[in-house]
Image (cartoon, helix red, strand yellow):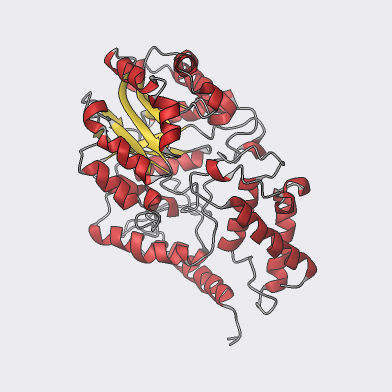
């Protein structure tokens, strides 16, 4: 063995061997053979009547533990599928995916006026009607997404909700959210309190135009705490939080999933989960982490661990996942049909040892939500971060010229960068204006990361790393 091999190359070689040997054993923990294709996907039938459900406290109805996030619908130009706010929606394919979900027991669909360039609600409404399922067989969740200052008036907020009902082709929604509160108390007051919108939303619940009222949270934990202190007044039916095993012990209070969840649990407020995979980061982990997970359950996908972690929490009502591709939908339905809850030991293993393995690799915590877009200077911020993270996970971010894989990694990074991000939208065009920072739910210092990446890329180009 080359004694001078760098750490990343060693991990990549070792994990590839481990992954290959683990995947070769295509049996489950009971010794039963599992049919997998060469990519590791199950080829057996997807269950149609085994979806795990949870009870909605206010109505007593059963809702699927897996929810369908509608930020990423199939696009007519397939290359746009990974760009949640770009490209024209393929309505025919969307109809197929939604019908497939309903046929296999998935009943909760979460959308927003802000998703898919404002087209998500209409596409979902069309798909649900086309499915032929009666209205009482599925649940719709949408949001009052009044982000822009010109939409902070009572009249515009009310009009936004009425448009949502029109696009969704329904006279009520099952879950209505104050969208992404947490920027600041002043922002909360301007958007929902001072203009009377929150009081009006409570009235809509009393009128039956929404059956459950809650909010989604990103940001300042002081705003979160204040909202929960108002529970006796507003009687929150649920709260949507970011929960995953990487964030369970997050040092940043506003992203500490353990704290956010426990504050809801002690008030008996049901939890809806967003980002169970952190925008795909927990399904695209480095090779040695794949081997680490496959060693325990070789028949399970990497993503299934993230879903099972979130869904095992007893106060969780539903776990939302964006599923553009049918194979992702099929895999997720298998995970929840039925759910096999984690043991306490498995939970500790994920949010402890496994999380530490992932955190040891310096990825940027971008979930590709695209709230930072559009950049006024044209940068493709999520695209830049996505390429960097992908290269980190595949061992193609060399530490220096002494790395044994330096030349190969350099070529992969630079060639892939130019293919993934047009030159005029790359990191070197960042002006440090900072307009993106306040919009980032993950609180990434985007200009700082762009400066760091620009210097790194320039050193790769000039062979001075």
* Numbered marks: total: 0
- For residue 416, side relative to residue 443 (left or right): right
Q: Quadrant of the C terminus?
A: bottom right
The reply to whether residue 313 is in sight is no
Residue at image point 55% right, 56% down: 364
Residue at image point 54% right, 41% down: 439
Residue 79: horizontal and vertical position, in percent?
Answer: 66, 39
- For residue 184, side relative to residue 32 (left or right): right
Q: Quadrant of the N terminus?
A: bottom right
- For residue 91, side relative to residue 29 (left or right): right
- For residue 129, side relative to residue 116 (left or right): left
Residue 385: horizontal and vertical position, in percent?
Answer: 61, 52
Residue at image point 27% right, 50% down: 341
| Displayed quadrant of residue 48 | top left
Q: Nearer the viewer, residue 1 or 367?
A: 367
Q: Is residue 159 above or below residue 285?
A: above
Residue 49: horizontal and vertical position, in percent?
Answer: 31, 33
Residue at image point 35% right, 44% down: 222
Q: Nearer the viewer, residue 63 or 260?
A: 260
Q: Is residue 183 above or below residue 446?
A: above
Q: Is residue 143 above or below residue 267?
A: above
Q: Is residue 151 above or below residue 16?
A: above
Residue 436: horizontal and vertical position, in percent?
Answer: 59, 43
The reply to whether residue 26 is in sight is yes
| Displayed quadrant of residue 247 | bottom left
């Amino acid at each position: 063995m080359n004694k001078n091999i760098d750490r990343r190359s060693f991990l990549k070689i070792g994990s590839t061997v481990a992954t290959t040997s683990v995947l070769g054993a295509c049996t489950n923990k009971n010794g039963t053979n599992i049919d997998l294709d060469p990519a590791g996907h199950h080829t057996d039938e997807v269950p149609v009547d085994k979806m795990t459900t949870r009870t909605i406290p206010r109505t007593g109805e059963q809702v699927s533990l897996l929810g369908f996030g509608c930020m990423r619908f199939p696009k007519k130009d397939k290359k746009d599928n990974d760009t949640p706010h770009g490209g024209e929606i393929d309505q025919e394919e969307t109809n197929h995916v939604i019908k497939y979900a309903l046929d296999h027991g998935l009943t909760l669909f979460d959308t927003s006026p802000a998703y898919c360039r404002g087209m998500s609600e209409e596409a979902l409404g069309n798909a649900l009607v086309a499915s032929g399922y009666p209205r009482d067989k599925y649940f719709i969740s949408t949001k009052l997404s009044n982000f822009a200052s010109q939409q902070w008036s009572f009249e515009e907020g009310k009009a936004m909700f009425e448009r949502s009902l029109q696009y969704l082709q329904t006279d009520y929604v099952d879950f209505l959210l104050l969208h992404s509160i947490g920027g600041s108390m002043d922002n909360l007051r301007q958007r929902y309190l001072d203009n009377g919108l929150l009081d009006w939303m409570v009235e809509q619940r009393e009128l039956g135009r929404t059956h459950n009222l809650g909010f989604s949270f990103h940001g300042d934990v002081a705003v979160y705490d204040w909202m929960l202190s108002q529970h006796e007044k507003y009687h929150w039916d649920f709260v949507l939080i970011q929960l995953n095993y990487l964030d369970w012990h997050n040092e940043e209070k506003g992203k500490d999933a353990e704290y956010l969840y426990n504050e809801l649990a002690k008030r008996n407020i049901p939890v809806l989960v967003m980002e169970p995979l952190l925008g795909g980061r927990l399904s695209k982990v480095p090779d040695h982490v794949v081997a680490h997970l496959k060693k325990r359950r070789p028949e399970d996908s990497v993503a299934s661990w993230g879903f099972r972690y979130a869904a095992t929490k007893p106060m969780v009502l539903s776990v939302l996942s964006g599923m553009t591709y049918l194979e992702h939908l099929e895999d997720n339905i298998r995970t929840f049909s039925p759910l096999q809850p984690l043991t306490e030991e498995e939970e500790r293993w994920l949010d402890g040892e496994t999380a530490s393995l992932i955190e040891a690799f310096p990825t940027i915590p971008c979930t590709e939500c695209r709230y930072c877009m559009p950049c006024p200077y044209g940068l493709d911020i999520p695209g830049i971060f996505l390429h960097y993270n992908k290269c980190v996970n595949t061992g193609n971010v060399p530490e220096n010229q002494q790395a044994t894989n330096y030349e190969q990694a350099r070529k992969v990074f630079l060639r892939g960068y130019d293919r993934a991000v047009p030159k005029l939208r790359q990191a070197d065009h960042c002006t440090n204006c900072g307009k993106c920072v306040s919009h980032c739910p993950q609180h990434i210092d985007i200009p700082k990361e762009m400066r760091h990446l620009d210097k790194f890329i320039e050193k790769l180009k000039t062979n001075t790393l």
